Every structure is written in C-alpha cells, then in structure tokens.
Amino acid sequence: MANGFLSQDLNGKVALVTGAASGLGKDIAQTYARAGAAVGIADINPAAAEAAAEEICAEGGRAMAVAMDVTDEAAVQAGTDRLAEAFGRLDILVSNAGIQIINPIDKLSLADWKKMLAIHLDGAFLTTQAALKHMYAQNSGTVIYMGSVHSHEASLYKAPYVTAKHGLLGLCRVLAKEGAAHQVRSHVICPGFVKTPLVEKQIPEQAKEKGITEEEVVKNIMLGQTVDGEFTTTQDIAQLALFLAAFPTNVFTGQSFLAGHGWHMK
C-alpha cells in the first residue's frame, strides 16, 4: 500500500486459474495477466486453454496452458507442478472450474450428484492440496474459491450445486486456520447470477422445469432478489479476485464476499 492507495500490481506473482479457457475464469486470468502475473490457464479443454493462453501472450502477458481435469488427482498435481516449475513459484490459486445440473431432488440421479460434487468440491480440494505444496514451501500464498450466492442461499432444482457451494465455505475456513502458520490465506467469492455460458444454459432448463417463459426465469428467478434487476458481470468478479489477490495483508482470510447486486445481504 503506497501513499494510502492499494496497489493492484501482481508483478512477480504466478497464478493458477481453473476453468480458465472461457467465461469467468478467462476474465480473471486476463485481469491477472494485465496486472503483471504469469498465469496458468487450467482447463479440461486443452485446445481452448491454448487459445486463451495465446491471447494473453499476444497482449504482452505471460501465460501457459495447463490441461487439467480437476477431478483427476494425478493430472492436478502434474499440471500444478509444471506451472510452478515453468515460472519458479505459485502465489495464487483460483479454484473456479464448475458445471451446473438442473433437476429436482426426486429426479436427480446419484451419478449427477456425484459428478457435481466431484468437480466443485473434490476439484477444490485437489487443486488446493497441489498448490499448498508450493505455497507452504515459499511461506506465502492466496487461495480463492469461486463460490456463489448459493454458498449462503438455496434455490429450487440445484441440490448438488448448493451443497457443493456451501461446502466451499467450510474448506476455505479450515484452510484459513491451517494456512495461517504458512502465511497462506483463503477467500470465497460468491457471485450472484453472472451471464456466462453456464448461466445461459440454465435459462431454458429452468423455464422448461417450471413451465414459464425464459424472460420470466431471468426477471423473476435470477434477478428477482437483486435491488436493481442487473446481472453481475465477469469483470465485477475479476476485479474482486484481483483485489483479494493483491491485498497486502491476511486481514480478510477465511471470509466470503457476496457480489450480487444486493441479492442476499449479509
């Protein structure tokens, strides 16, 4: 913090962002790169990860693609190690990879339940564990989990998603306590509805399940509890992720940050 102003400079830092080939993860990776960080674009789609990394490099940033299925322990460890070896360290993990499945509890298959929890919770655990190997060794690090307003709220037809997003709060809080001795901090960002491909996919699904129009899904379900009827943007969340990664102390460790135009004030 210089002259009373918070620096958002990530020069010399190395970040791993999962689910970073598109949508919110891609915006966070680009924002970090523009702030000076070297970024690992981790994604299950290697070609898309390569393309996203090339975009950053074309702008003069530093990035590398990391093929990663976050539910595969060996792939997570190998990809994380490769990034740390390429750039010499690992300072920031953004555990962002996720999917959505819309179904009421009585119709939800066990396979879909397990798939959701594996990607959101197992993925967060495995990437955290792989990152801590490097962060503990260097006695510093920031872990950011992409939660949701559904980390604090519930909605119809989203049992595994809501369960997983609540679980991230617990993982974050335990890491805050365990990581403190190693100067590693943890946070959960909890966006409202962000108009990413993941959310756009839900609109017709919810309209069909509820027997209403897509416009009603957006107005009454997705944005009905906001104060202004506005979607949260990927840039809103990317800027919050930058703020947390660049903050000079651990004062916010263990905390979740709601960003949803007033949906679920806490």
Image (cartoon, rainbow, N blue to C red):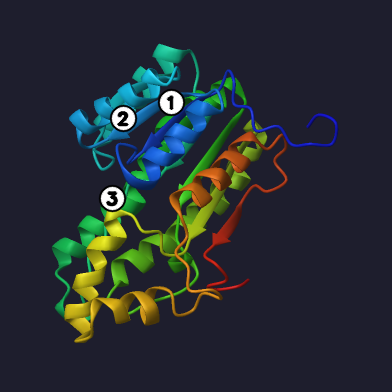
Image quadrant assignment for residue 206: bottom left
Amino acid type of the residue that numbered disc 3 sits on in the rendered structure: Ile
Q: Which of the two discs, 3 and 1, labels the residue nearer the N terminus?
A: 1
Image quadrant assignment for residue 241: top right
- Which label sits in the foreground, 3 or 1? 1
Q: Residue at horizontal 62%, vertical 25%?
A: 139
Q: Residue at horizontal 65%, vertical 33%?
A: 8
Q: In this view, does 119 lie to the left or right of 232?
A: left
Disc number placed over residue 25 in the picture, else none: none
Q: Are marks 3 and 1 in contact (CB under 8 Å)?
A: no
SS at badge 3:
helix
Q: In what quadrant of the picture does the N terminus appear?
A: top right
SS at badge 1:
strand
Q: Mark 1 points at which residue?
A: 39
Image quadrant assignment for residue 155: bottom left
Q: Are marks 1 and 2 in contact (CB under 8 Å)?
A: no
Are there few (<14), some (14-19), or many (20+) residues within 10 Å of tag 2?
many
Q: Which of the two discs, 2 and 3, labels the residue nearer the N terminus?
A: 2
Amino acid type of the residue that numbered disc 1 sits on in the rendered structure: Val
Q: Which of the two discs, 1 and 2, labels the residue nearer the N terminus?
A: 1
Q: Mark 3 points at which residue?
A: 119
Q: Mark 2 points at which residue?
A: 52
Amino acid type of the residue that numbered disc 2 sits on in the rendered structure: Ala
SS at badge 2:
helix
